[in-house]
Amino acid sequence: MIQQLSLLFPMLPMWLVQAIWCGVVAVLLLTFFSLFAGPVSWLERRIAGRIMSRIGPNRVGPQGIIQWLADGVKNFLKEDLIPRDADKILFRFAPYPVFLGVTLTLVTLPFSSLLIGADLNVGLLYIVGAWGLVVIGLIAAGWSSNNKWTLLGGMRSAAQMISYEIPLVLSLLVVVLMSGSLSLQTIISSQGASPVEWFIFSNPFAFIAFVIFMISAVAEGNRTPFDLPEAESELVAGYNTEYSGMRFLFFFFAEWGNLYVIGALAASLFLGGWQIPAGWRNFASAQGPILPHVFEVLMFQLKTWIWVLLIIQLRWTLPRLRVDQLMKVSWKYLTPFAFVSIVGTGLWMVVFPEGWLFMKYLLLFSMLAVIGYFVWRAIWQLRFTKSKADFKLIV
Amino acid sequence: MDYFKNIFESAATVFEGLTITASHMFRKPITIQYPDRTLSPVIEMLPSRYRGFLEVDMKICTGCTLCMQACPIQCINIEIAKKTPSPQPSPSRGEGDGGGVPMRLITKFNIDIALCMFCGLCTEPCPTGAIRFSKRFENATEDINKLMFKFVEEGKPVAPYKKSSG
Amino acid sequence: MLTLYKQLPNFILTTKLDELLNWCRKSSVWYMLFATACCGIELMQTGGPRCDWDRFGAVPRSTPRQSDLMIIAGTISYKMAVCTRRLYDQMPDPKYVIAMGSCANCGGLFKHSYSVLKGIDKVMPVDIYVPGCPPRPEALTDGLLKLQEKMQKEKFLRS
Amino acid sequence: MIKEKFTFAEEVKPQAGGGWYLVPADKIVEVCKTLRDDYKFDCLSCLTGIDLVDYFEVVYHLFSYSEKKPLVLKVKLEKQSSTMPSVSAIWPSANWMEREVFDLLGIKFENHPDLRRIMLPEDWAGHPLQKSYKEPEEYCGMSTKR
Amino acid sequence: MIRTEEMTISMGPQHPATHGVLRFIVKTDGEVLHEVKPDVGYLHRSMEKIAEKVGYISFQPYTDRIDYVCAMTCNHAYAMAVEKAAGISAPERAEYLRVIASELNRISSHLIMAGVMAMDIGAFTPFIHAIRERETVNDLFEMLCGARLTYNYVRIGGVSFDAPANFKEKCVEFLNHFEPIIDEFNRLISFNKIYVERLANVGVVSREDAIAYNLVGPNLRGSGVRFDVRKDIPYSIYPKIDFNVPVGIGEAGKVGDCYDRYMIRIREMKESCKIVRQALEQMPEGEIMAKVPRKIKPPVTEVYSRCESARGDMGFYLVSDGTDKPYRLKIRTGSFSAMSIVEKIAPGLMIADLVAFISSLDVVAPEVDR
């Protein structure tokens, strides 16, 4: 990206172009990130409302669109309250690594073939490293607010984050094994546009790796089956019990941001990020230089949002695990399967250097069958309760 | 063994849960959007027996204070003044004074809605059904004295209704 | 417009800003999960599907730190009054109180009881009294709307 | 059947309602133990204290789940001494019930695991269910009048 | 050597998991609990003193507030106690109306229990679905007696209102709507693996402990004791209605764990639907109120009457002295003794289990503190 820019502005020295480009990316990502968290929180409350047969926010602005703006400004106006005997410096410091940890991962997310913050050749390693920052923030928040509930919340988040980092990284290794490089752009370009060439269907072990990746990413983002750190019903509000106003919003942004990052990673690593079929590509490039990029960004967003919506729906269906069950799932179930999938993929690539087409189609059709059964089952549920849920007033 | 059974079970039940929540996405929400976006105001939707705020029809109230005695927490207080007929114009009822007989006049009939527990024990002994439940329920206020419902204005006492002997 | 300028006081700009800020505070009132007695069940019903408070942007928060409205839902005994007062102090500043039901308004049907606080206004300043025992979810929503009008009229910037 | 086991417990059969057994205060633990072990009254379903102006009365409602039979025991206590042995060793459910009777009526139970107020705050003066109880004017800063 | 120190936490009166205002002083080492001391009394409203001051007829609305989640059975229990003392008997139709109303109220009480338990374990949607179904039950009660939560419907000697004309078919319409919803609720949460894992073998109450600590109702039946006041000490019209009583059989783990107590309440909801259907069929015509003097003065007696409320058998011990005010009224509730067993079972549980255990006991604050 930098080379094309330096051609555009030949007179500027190389380092100045680099500095400007970094500044633009930083501003873009921060605004995108904070603007992203609001609408998603509105979307989640609407979906939650619909699942619970009620209506989410629809009074604030048309259909409640600017509900998040009202929440943000209100929290901004709240009193800046720090508990008297809390650890002042750590208390103020805690929200920033959490917010930073998630924002930094956006830098290497490939929105389209050209549109990427910085195409590091150690992209994946960088993302996992940046995600590690979040743990520091949570533990600092837990310890510094001098409240027993937050202490418990902080300890729980430490245990959960660390023990779910391992299956996460192992399942990423499978992708690195198949694509041969850590940089996200090359991972995506080594996957084709049609579903068969995606990594998820390349061999059954990669399919298992994808499932492990999703589960541990949900745990990494503190979403529902694993939302023990801010367990609403046990530890009052977990690590953010003592936080109010703007500081609480930083934790809020981090949680939604994590949601997007999980969706984006799943799309780019396993589902061939911005790859668009050849037909569209030459149709678009015929129109003009910009159009293919637009198509690519749209394809990437489409794939990301499927997972974001699924994780949101997951939150309103499943209860919460207990701490020891959380550990059991990570160590007894996810990590062994992650090892199996790495060894399996390695053997698979030795036995079938260019991949076994029949298995790819088999996996693809099994995935479609699962989705079909899901839709059929949902309609069956609807008919089962004879959609009496809208059983209005009897009177 | 049960290691794989656990995995299969949790996968199946999570799948089942997701289908149920997905099926809920297609159902209409049953919210009655209270203040303004309802088919008809919520008051009409309430059944006939709904116990809202108390209302007293002073025209048929005989001033027998049975309701005052029936209320467990005395939130109804009625004052009856004994007034011998005086030359000033007869009270609002406009009936004849009927000679020197001392007139009973209800000077105060307050119900403290902030205290009331809407139990209905006062509406039962009332001979003429003057005190009964309206269907109103909206009366949130900023100061508590507005919750003292006064059914007789200060100045104008009301003569109790004489039940016709027939 | 110029003539108008002379009559109106000079902070016309701030009323616009005040109005905006109050509108934001009004339309996202987070109430605290504080339910003692029967009114608590009606508070659950108001959070439920038929009379849904999420429409007004009111979300139940479990910690006093993140909530700016405290609904006293139910009877407050003397033993509980001390804790209620501490919870009220823990809430960050622009905070409001709705006294829900007769027990919170003035002790309600436990007037003869020796252990019940006769009205929550003895312990904390109350903004809105909602009559009813327990008040219908719609009555409580009417209370919330009145509170929102009150918030809208506040002079936030110069208070 | 209890008559011949305990000579001192005299039976009272009022005209309406079931009868009950009057047991002297110091014998109550021994009576209850045998009732639980031999006659399988394995559950103390209700323990009530009544203030009859010149003396206290503690009523034990026992129930046996195997034979589905209730039994009522009563103990008389003078107003001044108003202490009696606790049966919480025999039935654990008595633990809390005795604490409530102590809290509201002021009857002290010997060798009770932790006899302290259960319903009212620790620094509450007086025992409310006694007929001679006067309500305090105000309690730590909150006036009790509306 | 690592010296671990105990941490004392006060799961204070205002905590999302304590139903209403109960407080637990918990000594934990990290997550595992060493000792739990319940501290109750935060909602003590001196019902018994008020009964002595207010009189028989006026105490009726207070019985709604003893257990506001299942108010109708408290009304019924109190009216039965006073009728037994004063020798009044309610007419047939009134008994049927009382049983229909208390069974409907049992359904809505178990709905709250199942919903709050799911919320305490972490799933918020089943709680809102339970609240949605509870709205429809509230509509039925609004039609029947005019109030949503504090009904004051039962009078001493009968019932205050007769069932409106369309009450019967509206009830049947609700029951037809409700039964598939219970199955959907089960599929959504009861058979969910995480839910079962969180509740199986947690807080196991053995049969002897349940009886010794005087647990009653679904908590007692959860530990395998087959005892239901409606069956074993029949009152009102329950002998005329056939229904069976679900008992804990240890479906997912040992008998007497949280899952048993939960599943019993779900099955009891189905039984209550059956009871309401039969009662609606058999309800005779006739007047709804016996001849009762304006001031009820029962003779000098003492009466202990028991009635099966949603939280177990609720006993009213009434000592009357001939005046129109009870001399002493002792209200014996299920939640009071259920709270006392927390102290014995809790050591060794984790905090998340303690929350699950408390909501499986279905403890309600006013019943504990009266």
Image (cartoon, coloured by chain):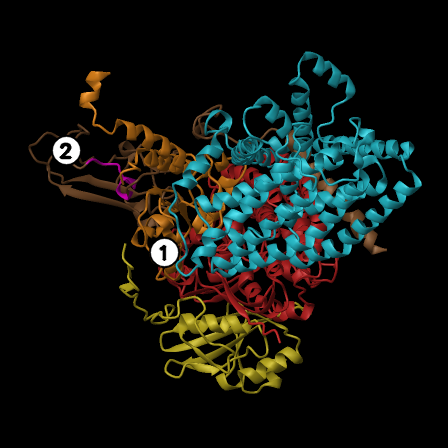
E338 drawn magenta = no
What residue did someone put label 1 on?
C85
What residue did someone put label 2 on?
B98
Q: Position of residue A235 (x, y in %)?
A: 54, 56
Question: Could you tell me how far apart the alpha carbons at marks 1 and 2 are, in whole angstroms?
Answer: 60 Å
The colour applied to the residues of chain E in this rendering is red
Depicted A339 relative to depicted C14: above or below: below
Mark toward the viewer: 1 or 2: 1
Type of amino acid under label 1: Arg
The colour applied to the residues of chain A in this rendering is cyan
Side of B25 relative to E291 (left or right): right
Quick check: marks 1 and 2 in contact, CB under 8 Å?
no
Image: magenta residue range: B144-153
The colour applied to the residues of chain B in this rendering is brown
B149 drawn magenta = yes
Type of amino acid under label 2: Gly
